[in-house]
Amino acid sequence: MSTTGGEPVITSYGHAPTRTVATDGNTFAYRELGPKGGVPVVLFAHLAATLDNWDPRIVDPIAASRRVIAFDQLGVGAASGQVPPTIEQAADDAYAFITALGHHRIDVVAFSMGAMIAQDLVIKHPDLVRKLVLTGTGPRGGKGIDKVVGTTYWDILRATVTRSDPKEFLFFNRDAAGKAAGKAFVNRLKERTADRDQPISTKAFRTQLKAIQRYGRSEPSDLSLITQPTLIANGDNDRMVPSALSEDLHRRISGSELIIYPDSGHGGIFQYHEQFAPVVVEFLDR
C-alpha cells in the first residue's frame, strides 16, 4: 500500500475492499485498487468465477500503475439479480455496471467467458473500450466452444474423485509442470483470507454454461468492427476453448497481437504469469 496526496492507495488485490453499486434495481459487487485517475482497467472473469478468482500475480502488477476494477456478474457472488441467459445480455449488464461507476472510457483485461462478454461489449459500444486483452477465449460461433459443457462436467468429476479443485483439471495440463502450476494457482487464490466472496450457485453456474453453449452455436460476429489495439493470449493445449480459436481471433481482429504459451492449457496466462503480467502492463501503458 502506498499513498497519493495523503490518501492510501491499495495496490494488493488481496486487500481491496468489496463495494457495491446499484443499477436499475440490481446491485453489482466489485473491488477497486490502484491509483485513481486515467483510464481504468476493467477485469472480465471466467465461467463460475467470483471476485476471489482473479490471480493476484496478474492483477497486482497492473494495479501498481493503473486503476483496476473487478466485478461480479449479476447473480454471482455478492451481486444481486439473476445470471443472464446469453453472453449478449451479460455484455449489456457489464455496460450498465461500468457506466454506473461513471466511466465512459476503459481498458479491458478478460479471460475465457469474460473475453466472450468483452467482445460483445466492444462491438456494441466501440467508443467505450480503448484497449482490449482477450485470453483463453474464442469468437462467437467458434468451432468446439459448444463442447464446453461436456468438458467441464467431466473435469469436475475427475476433480471430485481426486479431491482437487476443478480448475486444476480445466485450466492446466496433467503433466508434472501443469499439476504444479495448477496447485500454485489455486493456492494463490486462497491468499485473501478476509471479506471473501460467496461461491457461485449451481443454478447460476448452469445458466452460464448454457450461455457459452449458445454463444458457440451462434452466427459469428463481425470482428472487423474491433479496431482497438488488441492482445490475445492462450496456452497451446486449451481443452475448454480450443487454442486454434485464439489464432482465429488474431486473424479476424486486424493488427492484433498473439501470444501462445507452450506446454500449457486454458490457464496458460496463470501458468506463465511471470511472463504475461509485464507484457500486459506494457501493452496497456504503451
Image (cartoon, helix red, strand yellow):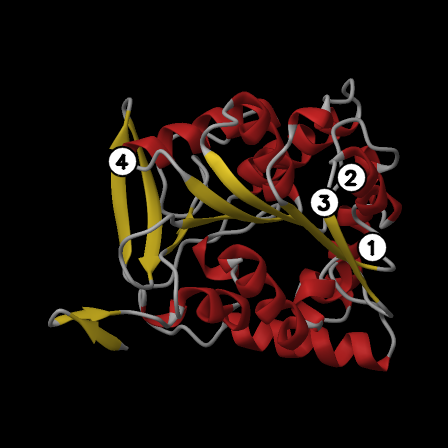
Instruction: Identify residue for label 2.
Output: 249
Of the residues tagged 3 and 1, which is closer to the observer?
A: 3
Q: Who comes first in sequence, dot 2 or dot 4? A: 4
Quote the CA–CA distance across marks 4 and 1: 36 Å
Q: Residue at x 40, y 65 (%)?
A: 63
Task: For label 2, count other residues whose C-alpha is less than 10 Å away and answer few (under 14), some (14-19) or many (20+).
Answer: many
At x 48%, y 46%, the residue is 107
| Amino acid type assigned to the residue bearing label 2 in the image | Leu
Q: What label does residue 256 carry, if any? A: 3
Q: Nearer the viewer, mark 2 or mark 1?
A: 2
150 shown above or below 172: above
Residue annotated with mark 1: 238
- Whether pointer 3 and pointer 2 mark residues with C-beta atoms closer than 8 Å, the reply is yes
x, y percent for residue 247: 84, 45
Mark 4, residue position: 102
Residue plotted at (54% across, 21% down): 124
Mark whose residue sits in front, 4 or 1: 4
